Image (cartoon, grey):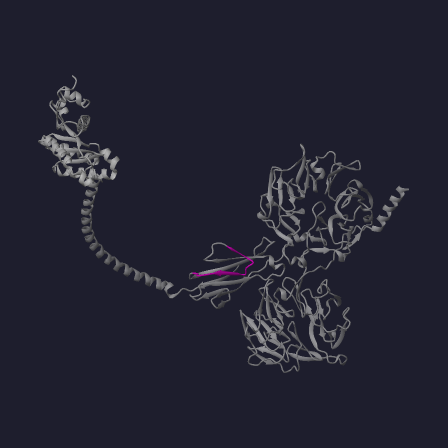
Amino acid sequence: MRWFCAFFVKLVLGCVIALNVQSMVLTQDDYLYRVWSVDAGLPQISVTAIEQDADGFLWLGTQSGLARFDGVQFDVFNTSNTPQMSSNLITALHFDVQGGLWIGSVNGLMRYQHGTFSRLDLAQPLQGAVSGFAELSDGSIYIGGNHLWQWQQDKMQAVTVHQGPVFQLYQHNDNLYVGGQDGFASLINGQYQWHAAPQTIAGVQISEIAIQDGQLYLGTTFGLYRWQAGVWQAVTLPGANDDRRIELLYLDQQQRLWVTTYSHVYKMRQGVVERADVVKGKHQDFVWVESMLQDKHQNLWFGSRSHGLKRLRKPPTQRFSVAEGIPDPYVWAVMPWQQHLLVGTSAGMSLLQHGQFQPLMANQYLPNPFVYSFLLDDDQLWVGTRAGLSLLDANTLGWRRNFDQIAHLLVTTLAREDDTLWVGTNGGLYYLQHDELLQHKLPEALTKVKVRIVLPDSQNRLWVGTENGLFVRDDNGFHPVTDIPLAGSFISMIKQFDDGNLLIGSFDQGFLFGSPGNWQWFNQQRGLPGNGVIHVEKIENQLVISNFEGFYRMDYSALLQGKVDKLYMLVDDRRPEAETDSHRCCNGAGSSKGTVHQGRLWFPTLNGVVSLPLQQLIQYNHVPQPVINALSAGNEKYYGEKLSLPPEQRDWQVSFTAPYYVQASSLQLRYQLRGYDSNWIDAGSRRDAFYTNLPPGHYRFLLQVRVAGDYRWSETVETAIELQPHWHETSFARVALLLLLAVLLWGLYHWRLLALARSRRQLASLVAERTYELHQANEKLQQMSMQDALTGLYNRHYLDTNIHAIQSRAQRHSTPLIWAVLDLDHFKQINDSQGHHVGDEVLIAIADILRQNSRGSDHLIRWGGEEFLLILEAADDAVLALERIQQAIRQYPWTETLGIAKPLTCSIGAVAKPVNWDWQQSLKLADQALYRVKQSGRNGYLLLQATVPVATLSAENRIDDLLANGSLTATSDLATLTTYADNIPG
């Protein structure tokens, strides 16, 4: 019985679905929109007129002035900043064939051309509002107001053939139609004709006129009429009721006639009228449309008297959502099914057929209506839900069974590998075996982790992407992949291409491309518009990648070379205006997050599904065109492609923009002043460039623009600028200055020669003087370097410097030199008892005694401490000289002058040095002689003299040996030393 019931249910489901194998029919008329009002910079909420100039700027008439709009900024011209404006209440706008903008207000006529406003009706001020303009092929311009006027030869003339006010002017080919009171007029081939309204609509005003498919339509205060051969036929507008007054008639480039009343907007084609509620919006609040424009990129603009400015555009994508019958707009999975599209939503599965969604009967058997993933597996359709896995019949979409083992888990991904079905959930990885979901052959790490994507590749590897990193099963079993930049990251997508390359996509860290051991990492730093990856499709040589900020295409062959090239955003949701001006995409992380079907790309979103025809992959939106507005210098503004500035204008402000009306905040501008800048300068969000203190010369200001999601830069626009030089910066002035400089240089050179000659003479004299002074200073320094600083006697350096000269004189005169070493007796006791300062005074006094008791030829040297060396030249009586010095020291008043208790004495050891004897040996012998005096009680002298030829003396002989063998004789004033030689042991 259960088998029969199941079979019956399947049969019923197959019949209810009524499957149709025809291709899906998609005829949706989908618009995206954006609204601007006073909060965006519009000067006032009433937009009375809209026109577009050759540069792409929109010019808007409002009740608070004229506005020029580039998609980002409204530049407002009103009576406070533009004296030529007669009023801020703008009623009509028109661009003539020369590009001049005609501006009508409630009480005047103006024109804007080449950056300048002018008032045209000063000589004959208009009375009442300007209602419209019309321009014929002969250049004549008609102006409607309280009368019909014609502008010719720079002046305004009344067209007297027409009587009464003009509510509308309409020009078709070279025919002019004039809307008036109780009828309208035609001016065809110079022939004026009045067409009166029937009496049934007496008092009617003809405020709008248009011709569609050869039919003349009249918008009146009593409704819409079709006029032909004098017959007025009322046209019924659906839902108009008492809202009969026609506010606007506008024929677009597709020959659709747009009709507006206070409450509604209609469009008419081939005589069929239908409501265009898309203009009013989902809140039905954009009403009272009284101005309209279709711009050069087919965007539709609507001006409301009460709600500002609105733009509608046809995007390359289409959205299928609540309006097409989807039970819940939150879509998580898409999959082709026959010729239709199967979608998984938060409220179950639906099939998109013929542009409409049909929920499946199988939804009632799902463990949870939240459908997140699909897998079509031959005649089986696997469905992953928030509460486990279901199996459907792939041919009838009838329910077969649920798998209760994972009823507590969200099934994020499904993959078939040979006989194994892999099931990824937010509670680990499972595999289906014998109709049972198992985990026991899997490593523990994969039994608990949140799995997002599973992919068996062509090399028999199984890749598992989780929220905590990437795993792979290869010949070594399952293991985490740790040698990649995305190790530990949220892996949201894995895709293998026909050439064997893999793409590993992450939630927020970019993607890897290549193969194990040969990965390349791509992220925003390397040129991607975002770091997320939800779904990837390769179509021909293009890679399409979706993420939470839209989807984009890029060149696949460039990716093989490690580069990001030809990247183009197909849907860009990164801007705040994307809320209404984009088909927001995309959604989810796992299987079934995109597909190619019926020549379209399909993506799930939080508002239905979005599709993109594949032919759009080879098409582009238009590239914005940059515009250089003006160059400001000082209080002046300069316009045009070639500018010449006076010399004093050295500080510039160049204003620029790019009129663009689709997510204009995404524009990127760059500029360069050739002749000054070496590279392009990124302007960021700025629309100005500043330069200061520029030198004179010829410059070119270059400007380019692109959309942030488009790799293409626009063509370069430029302005040539000549900054004139001051008179002293001209070539003539420079040549004259050079000549004058040459004369001055010659005079300076001549004067310099004279000055140099004089300076040479002064220098020669000065050099001589300085040389003498230097010689004196050197000699003084030489002398100072040979003097003892305390006593003023010579020092050892003196001896080293002069010993050869001293010996040479002695040799020349064949006279011996007396070398005497003098040491003060008990000098240490003076330093210890009375201080070193007294000791220094003693040494100074000794030096004075030595100077007073020596000859000019004697050499007085402080040898060290209290020792002095005396070298006596040509001393015939050395004994007398030594005794004189001793006597002078003993007799000096030491007590009276220095407070020394005992008279000071000295000990002297001396040698009479033969001519050819080594002076150092002589000094050594004199020192030994001093030592003998010290041993003998001090206060005496010992003089040694050679008695044998010099050659027989040895430098190694001691004094005792020399005295013992008779080589020396000794003379002393000490008794113990007079018999010194006799007492030496022999």
Residue 978 shown left or right of residue 279 in the figure: left
Position of the N terminus by quadrant: top right
Of all residues, the one furthest to the top in this rendering is 986
Question: In terms of depth relative to the viewer, which is nearer, 519 or 651?
Answer: 651
Instruction: Mark yes or no: residue 773 visible.
Output: yes
Residues drawn in magenta = 680-694
| The image quarter in which residue 39 lies | bottom right
Q: Is residue 311 above or below residue 466?
A: below
Residue 733 locus on image (x, y percent): 35, 64
Count of residue discs: 0
Q: For residue 690: magenta?
A: yes
Residue farthest toward the left in the current orientation of the protein: 876
Residue 787 appears in the rendering: no
Q: Quick check: 37 above or below 404?
A: below
Q: Quadrant of the C terminus?
A: top left
**Residue 731 image position (x, y, % from top left):** 37, 62
Give x and y (percent) for residue 680: 51, 55
Residue in the picture at 65% in, 70% down: 46
> Which residue ends up furthest to the front in the rendered image?
901
Percent position of residue 907, x then y:
17, 30
Determine whether 395 is above or below 859 in the image. below
